[in-house]
Image (cartoon, grey):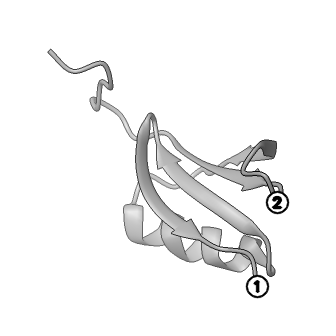
Amino acid sequence: MSDCPSDETDFRVFFLDENGKIKKSKALKTIIEAEAIAEAEKMADGRKIELYDGCRLVFTIDAQ
């Protein structure tokens, strides 16, 4: 049995500081992974972010 249930999509973008600590997060309304990735890319704006679906890491963008 998995500790990370995956029955429903629950995309959330986490904005991280220079130490990798979460500064804030934002829930996304989409249920389509490709759309969630595209939205996260737009939000990055040079910052390090991680996109999760529940507890599954989907995508990471490093700070520029």
Would you say 59 lies left or right of 14 here?
left
Q: Amino acid at mark 1?
A: Gln
Residue furthest left as drawn: 1
Q: Which mark is residue 18?
A: 2
Residue furthest top as drawn: 1
| Residue 57 to residue 32: above or below | above
Of callouts 2 and 1, the N-terminal one: 2
- Residue 41: x and y in percent read 63, 77
- Residue 52: x and y in percent read 50, 48
| Residue 26 to residue 42: above or below | above
Q: Which mark is residue 64?
A: 1
- Residue at 40 percent of width and 41 percent of height: 9
Which quadrant of the rendered structure holds the N terminus? top left
Would you say 37 lies left or right of 42 here?
left
Q: Amino acid at mark 2?
A: Glu
Dot 1 alpha-carbon crowd within 10 angstroms: few under 14, some 14 to 19, many 20 or more: few
Q: From the viewer's side, name the closer residue of 44 and 33.
A: 44
- Residue 39: x and y in percent read 62, 71
| Residue 64 to residue 20: above or below | below
